[in-house]
């Protein structure tokens, strides 16, 4: 079964780095453990989905979440993911998932792929919190300018 991110407080970090060629700036989002090591299971699944989504996609995802929370969601095919972005897949209608939770796989990571690894279990609340943090970080980048954010870490709690 998937690992549930049940740690009471996990630290998210968002930051901007400058590409080696010096022309572009890139935002990244990741989760760290208490000892400062990157938590790959959260970063490579939940946070990659969130950081690769477009802001307008949250309406579609939120609509699915609300249906699932009410018990009204019935997947067209329970063997297929209910939503996804860039080979990161989200399931919320499988029989082995409790209401209010989702499974996320990353098909680029064997450890967390749906075929070879273990998709990770998160609450819909964790997904919403991560997305809100990422959107707020992107707004901060627009306000300050990404070039002025290089080296600055912004922290959030998941």
Image: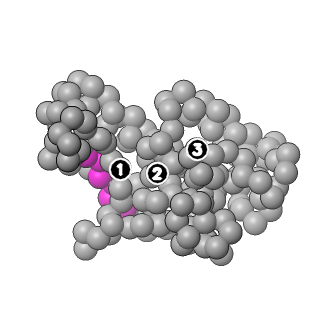
Q: Any magenta on residue 9?
A: no
Check disc 1: other Cα within 10 Å, few if <14, some if 14-19, many if 20+.
many
SS category of the residue bearing label 2: helix
Q: Is residue 125 above or below residue 118?
A: above
Span of residues in magenta: 10-15
Tell me if I can see residue 121 in this picture.
no
Q: Given contact means CB atoms under 8 Å apart, are the residues at marks 2 and 1 in contact? A: yes
Residue at the (29%, 52%) spot, across then down: 13
- Tell me the residue that label 2 is attached to: 48
Mark identifier at residue 142: none
Which is nearer the N-term, disc 2 or disc 3?
A: 2
Q: How many marks?
A: 3
Front residue of 16/121: it is 16
Label 1 sits on residue? 29
Depth-wise, is mark 1 or mark 3 nearer the camera? 3
Residue at the image point whose x is 29% and y is 41% from the top: 26
Other-residue count near label 3 (Cα within 10 Å), few / some / many at <14 / 14–19 / ≥20: some
Quarter of the picture containing the N terminus is: bottom right
Please provide percent x and percent y for residue 76. 85, 45
Indicate the secondary structure of the residue bearing disc 3: strand
Q: Residue furthest front?
A: 21
Q: How is the image coloured?
A: one colour
Location of mark 3 (residue): 85
Q: Residue furthest top?
A: 143
Q: Is residue 72 left or right of residue 46?
A: right
Q: Is residue 94 visible?
A: yes
The foreground one among 107 and 31 is 107
- Measured along the vertical axis of the image, is residue 135 above or below residue 93? above
Q: How far apart in space, not on screen, are marks 2 and 3 (Cα)?
A: 9 Å
């Amino acid at each position: 079964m998937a690992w549930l991110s049940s740690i009471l407080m996990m630290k998210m970090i968002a930051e901007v780095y400058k590409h080696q060629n010096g022309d572009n700036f890139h935002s990244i989002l990741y989760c760290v453990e208490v000892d400062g090591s990157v938590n790959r299971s959260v970063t490579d699944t939940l946070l990659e989905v969130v950081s690769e989504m477009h802001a307008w996609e949250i309406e579609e995802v939120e609509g699915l979440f609300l249906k699932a929370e009410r018990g009204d969601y019935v997947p067209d095919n329970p063997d297929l993911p209910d939503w996804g972005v860039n080979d990161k897949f989200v399931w919320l209608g499988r029989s082995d998932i409790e209401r209010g939770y989702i499974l996320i796989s990353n098909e680029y990571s064997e450890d967390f792929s749906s075929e070879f690894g273990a998709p990770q279990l998160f609450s819909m609340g964790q997904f919403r919190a991560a997305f809100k943090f990422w959107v707020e970080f992107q707004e901060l980048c627009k306000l300050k300018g990404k070039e002025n954010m290089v080296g600055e870490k912004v922290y959030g709690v998941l």
